[in-house]
Amino acid sequence: MNQSSFRANGLFFLVLLLLVQGCGRKEKKAEKQPETKPAGISNILFFLETSASMGGYLKGETNFKVTVSELVTKLNQVAPVEVWTIAGKPQPFAGGYNQFVVNLATTPLANERSSELHRIFKQVGEKAKGNTVAMLVSDCILSFPDAEIKKNPEINRQNAESVLKSQINDQFAALKKQGISATVFAYSSGFNGTYYDYQNNKHKLTGESRPFYVWVIGKQELVADLNQKLNELLITKPAKQLDFGASGALKQYDLFFSLNKKGDWRAEKAGLSELTVKPSKPAEFAVGVNLGGLPTYAQAEDYVKKNLAVTSPNATVKLVNVQKKEKVPTERIKERELKLLNQNTHVLTFRVENLYDEKADVAIKLPVRFDDWYATGWSTMDDRTPASRLNKTFALVHLMNGVKEAYQSSTNDFLVLNLTLEK
């Protein structure tokens, strides 16, 4: 082989080596890292209050035992369940959730001294960290300690609103600061045993219907996810439900460029431009919003229609329709817009009837509202007779108002959207 051939061959192999290395580098660079999915519920801590006042729910055939057994079993299909009992101090149940279900039917569990409810909520709330959801089953009767009732038998009635409500409010305000939300489910059950009225007098009940409550406490998105799954899984449904949110208002939206469009305008990042409008020829536009993290009742179309507030000092803008994603016709929607639709839960359509200036700011708000079922039919301030306590909980109105006021304020909104309209 002559020298020139040798150099040519050497150059060929050098180029080939560089190409191979280059391809290797490109392949390595092109490798995609596995996508990290949003973390869900890691585990569920299930607390059963076991003060003596709960004993009557566990004797005989009661809806309480049916409900709690089903709850624990179905919860374990969502995430691993750890069972705890709580009165004075939380205690892990050593036998696992299957043994707990057996013990509900065979073993007296509720035999501890009563504990102040705000302390129980504090201890349960402290467990709702990270991706853990904590749950509490309780009769939710607000009461001062036994020693205080002995000194003044009327202390519970006299000071439930001023003292006990404030203690509950303080505890849930602390949870809200940590981004922790809560949901309460209300049930009723036959009660066979000793009932203690607000003066700590004993009443022997046989099958009398008594309320009890299941609280779900954790990060708002985890609580919303668990509530949805329970709604699908449970056969024994709660009679009532109330959700308390903790996170700030939702501010993200997607402006559709053709869906439900009427009139002349262009879609921009911040709103509408090149808008031509007058009362005789209004324009309409639609936005997509994801309300999946809101309480179930706040996702209802009627709720949004009734409570959504639209304000603009330089324009006349009205909400004309609310559609859940599943109800939006998709036959004529382009692929790009279909992607926007699929990442939202609702479509809100608005009508612009007038634009009084070259540019107008529009604020769209969905304020937080809470149902008041607990005040109208589930609460009593005198539980000494069967008629006055039937299916009612002493001072429940003060407990629930304490929680509600911790989460609700005049500036508390589920949704706050801002956009502009421009000629």
Image (cartoon, helix red, strand yellow):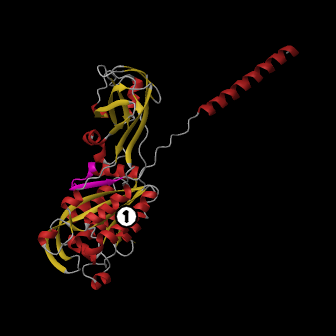
Identify the element where label 1 is drawn. helix
Q: Quadrant of residue 131?
A: bottom left
Residue 303 visible in the snapshot: yes
At x 43%, y 40%, the residue is: 251
Identify which amino acid the numbered label 1 is placed on: Asn
Q: In which quadrant is the C terminus drawn?
A: top left
Residue 274 vs residue 261, the one in the foreground: 274
Q: Position of residue 293 (x, y in %)?
A: 37, 46
Residue 298 vs residue 94, the one in the foreground: 298
Q: Position of residue 109 (x, y in %)?
A: 28, 74
The residue wearing badge 1 is: 169
Q: Relative to 419, does residue 178 appear above or below in the rendering?
A: below
Image: magenta residue range: 231-244
Q: Quadrant of residue 163?
A: bottom left
Q: Position of residue 35 (x, y in %)?
A: 51, 40
Q: In which quadrant is the N terminus drawn?
A: top right
At x 28%, y 85%, the residue is: 150
